[in-house]
Image (cartoon, helix red, strand yellow):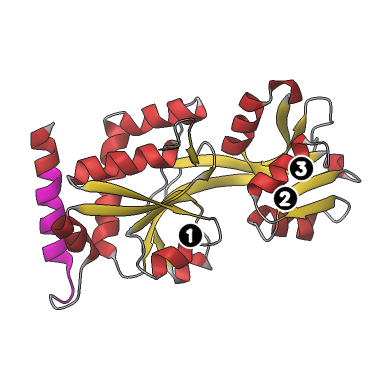
Amino acid sequence: MRQLKSLFAIAATALAVLAAPNLAHADKLQDVLGSGKLRVGILTDAAPWGFKDDKGEIAGLDADLARLIAADMGVKLELVPVTGAARIPSLLSDKIDMLIAGLGATPERAQQVMFSQPYAVVNLGVYGAKSLPSATSKKPDNLDGRSVAVAKGSTLDVWLTDNAPKVKLVRFEDTPAALAAFLAGQADTFAENSAIALKVQDQNPTKEVELKFLIRQSPAHVGVRQGEQNLLNWINTDIFFNKLNGKLGALQLKWFREEQSLPTL
């Protein structure tokens, strides 16, 4: 294992030197290797991506992946809590070296962020009690007249606003507030991804939460700043390597209860 970590470090250093377009330009991969520390931005309010466990320690798929990446790189890990809204600003202001925070790729975000190959994939949709009718078509007709708790300004908020005019959207500042409203009976359903819905069901089995309408799949990516191609190349190599050795699949199984077949970017 020690030899494997050394090979990763050597390969990363060689990649940084060979691919650098300008030796005078700072290279993030070399910076991380030189400092011996990797700063990773992570959510702490979005189980099972990232959350604080009973001991107050950061846990979740993203936290485990960050630990795996830092170990393969041979550096110490610093987990930096970020909010959903502050994820990309924290990256752009160099408060962190990379984002592992359930980050979805969009053309708008790609103007500022470079995305790795996906390390997990979830379903975006509307979730509710088993007793509610499920969709029978590609339109959310089953939700007409029903209330949906959603995080304000999220991808799901935008989609439902544009495509489900008969749904009663109840907007909240963030995901925890939207989920709390659903659990308190203030909304019939909630809009989120399948990983978070699974956690809601685990913690509230009497709610019998299940998918009511599927909007689309949403892969999760590691994010780095534009121009940090060397670091991105290393991350993609590490994700690929850990797919092959089964470690990534083990993390997916641990947190999502299934090993996933991932799309490519």
The dot on residue 181 is: 3
Q: Quadrant of the rendered structure where residue 207 is?
A: top right
Q: Nearer the viewer, residue 191 or 48?
A: 48
Q: Position of residue 164 (x, y in %)?
A: 81, 53
Q: Check disc 1 and report the residue beneath it.
A: 87
Residue plotted at (14% across, 40% down): 5
Say which amino acid is labelled 1.
Answer: Arg
Q: Are marks 1 and 2 in contact (CB under 8 Å)?
A: no
Query: Horizontal placement of 98 versus 14: left or right?
Result: right
Labels 1 and 3: the sequence-earlier one: 1
| Residue 265 in sight | no
Mark 2 crowdedness (10 Å alpha carbons): few <14, some 14-19, many ≥20: many
| Residue 22 in sight | yes
Say which amino acid is labelled 3.
Answer: Ala
Q: Is residue 60 above or below residue 145?
A: above
Q: Nearer the viewer, residue 4 or 56?
A: 56
As drawn, the residue found furthest toward the front would be 55
Q: Position of residue 155 (x, y in %)?
A: 64, 56
Magenta residues (range):
7-22
Query: Horizontal placement of 210 versus 263: left or right?
Result: right
Q: Position of residue 77 (x, y in %)?
A: 27, 47
Q: Nearer the viewer, residue 198 or 54?
A: 54
Q: Is residue 135 magenta?
A: no
Secondary structure of residue under mark 3: helix
Q: Are marks 1 and 3 in contact (CB under 8 Å)?
A: no
Residue plotted at (29% across, 50% down): 235
Q: Check disc 2 and report the residue beneath it.
A: 150
